Image (spheres, rainbow, N blue to C red):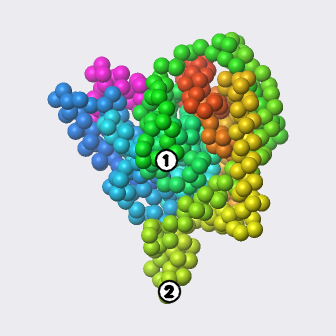
Amino acid sequence: MEITDLTVHELRDKIINKEIQITDITKAYIDKINECEKDIDAFINPLTEEALKKSKQIEQKKENGEIIGEYAGIPIGIKDAICTKGIKTTCGSRMLENFISPYDATVIEKLNKQDIINLGKLNMDEFAMGGSTEYSYFKKTKNPWNLNKVPGGSSGGSAAAVASNMVPWTLGSDTGGSIRQPASFCGVVGLKPTYGLVSRYGLVAYASSLEQIGPITKDVTDSAILLNLIAGHDEKDSTSANIPKKDYTKCLKNDVKDLRIGVPKEFFGEGINEEVKKSIENTIEEYKKLGAKVEEFSLSIDKYALSSYYIIAWAESSSNLGRFDGIRYGYRTPNYNNLKELYRKSRSEGFGDEVKRRIMLGTYVLSAGYYDAYYKKAQKVRTLVINEFNKAFQKYDIIITPTSPVVAYDIGSKSNNPLEMYLADICTVPLNVAGLPGISIPVGVDSEGMPIGMQIIGNKFQEETILNAAYTIEQQIKFRENYKAKMKGGK
């Protein structure tokens, strides 16, 4: 087996057992990037030279007997919405094309303390606004399973890089499914933590009350490991939750006997691809065989959650992106005659069409005369969504739905129909509205060989419950062993 086929926990074991050197790992991934990146286009800014230099330094520290992190020398890729000191952080936008962050995000500080190596910044939909990674200013990322398909978004570069073995794991961000949906499309594992579990300090803001940083990995064990490394209270983030630290790897018990699983019938109705539906239903049957207690129930929030999500997200994006005006931050037009023209032309030239659309809609719903009708009402609906989930979790330990109603679609097939793309988020956005944790795991492929993801939803700060449920079914299905050879790109 090649080095780049291994999971993080397998790489760590080989380092500990002195079967492999840290520099060998870094070189293997650099070779894989050189081989695959021209087809996948997952990276905005590869940091291969810097990574090789750091790997040699860490190897030397290890040989000298100096203290290093448990996962020292393991490479990682970072979504380009997460600030990295001295390195460009572009958010996939012309507006920040030349922005070099003066500080590290809290999650990056934590990874640096572990001596984890940053292999590069990964492509994304501009300012995380999109579901296909077609809205990046720099390039369109392709799905490693089929280079004519989208990888999902907005963390499409992060998911595609893991699926094509260019990095063993990555960090993404999830505002309405932007970790889970690309994980589903690319056949990898994507975890959105509970809102507040992971610090958002240093994440360039799109919709502050909705978004969370989280891991995209090859398997559930790696997801638990990376969550261990990045979770925790942060005084620099006012939304950070101050709860006791947990070791999420200890919850992976491969046992779901008597686990109470709720299956909301509304998420399996109109608009769900039949092959997706069948694959999820087959997986639910596996849970029954393993002793879980499964029950169908009604959770009639899907359409209301989607509507409230987009109003809240647009409103917050309008506010957050107001700072990018050509004076305080971001791109400045070279040709202007007065201050008003400077503002207008800088923002018109610096932002792409999808970002402009969301800023304008957000400004509209916050404007006088419309605030009560739209934004205030959306916040009331948000409370209803939270209450409905609270009722459900009084009865069930986890809730299972498809991650996406469809599999990865052709590049360009939805980019001219934004409403259709928004509707594709119907399974994922309720969690962001309610601040709940969710994980997407691959459970099969469709007739065209494209991955199908299943979403497991848990109550607030119950990541250990969804991780164990995901781990247990992962051991049963063995997706990586059975399907990874079918991948068309990134070999």
- The structure residue drawn at horizontal position 66% and vertical position 66%, both measured from the top left corner, is 363
* Rendered residue at 31%/31% (across/down): 69
Of the residues under marks 2 and 1, which one precedes in the sequence?
1
**In the rendered structure, which segment of residues is drawn in magenta?**
1-25
Specify whether residue 122 is in view. no
Q: Position of residue 208 (x, y in %)?
A: 56, 51
Residues at circles 2 and 1 in contact by the CB criterion of under 8 Å = no
Q: Residue at x 49, y 87 (%)?
A: 337
- Residue at the (69%, 41%) spot, across then down: 430
In the displayed structure image, the side of residue 489 where residue 166 appears, left or right:
left
Give the residue type at disc 1. Answer: Ser
Q: Measure how far apart labels 2 and 1 are at the Cα level.
A: 38 Å
Q: Which residue is mark 2?
A: 338
Main SS, magenta residues? helix
Q: Position of residue 471 (x, y in %)?
A: 56, 22
The quarter of the rendered structure image containing the N terminus is top left
Q: For mark 1, does the 10 Å Cα neighbourhood hold few (<14), some (14 to 19), or many (20 or more) residues?
A: few
- Inspect the image, locate mark 2, and give the three-letter code of the amino acid beneath it: Asn
Q: Which mark is residue 238?
A: 1
Q: How many marks?
A: 2
Up/down of 399 relative to 366, above or below:
above
Q: Is residue 195 above or below residue 219?
A: below
Secondary element under disc 2, as helix, strand or loop, is loop
* Magenta segment includes 67: no
Residue situated in front as seen by the camera: 359 or 368: 368
- Asked if residue 240 is positioned above or below residue 308 in the image, the reply reads above
Residues 37 and 278: in front is 278
Q: Quadrant of residue 228?
A: top left
Q: Quadrant of residue 485?
A: top right
Residue 168: x and y, percent? Answer: 44, 35
Q: Can residue 45 be seen by looking at this rendering? A: yes
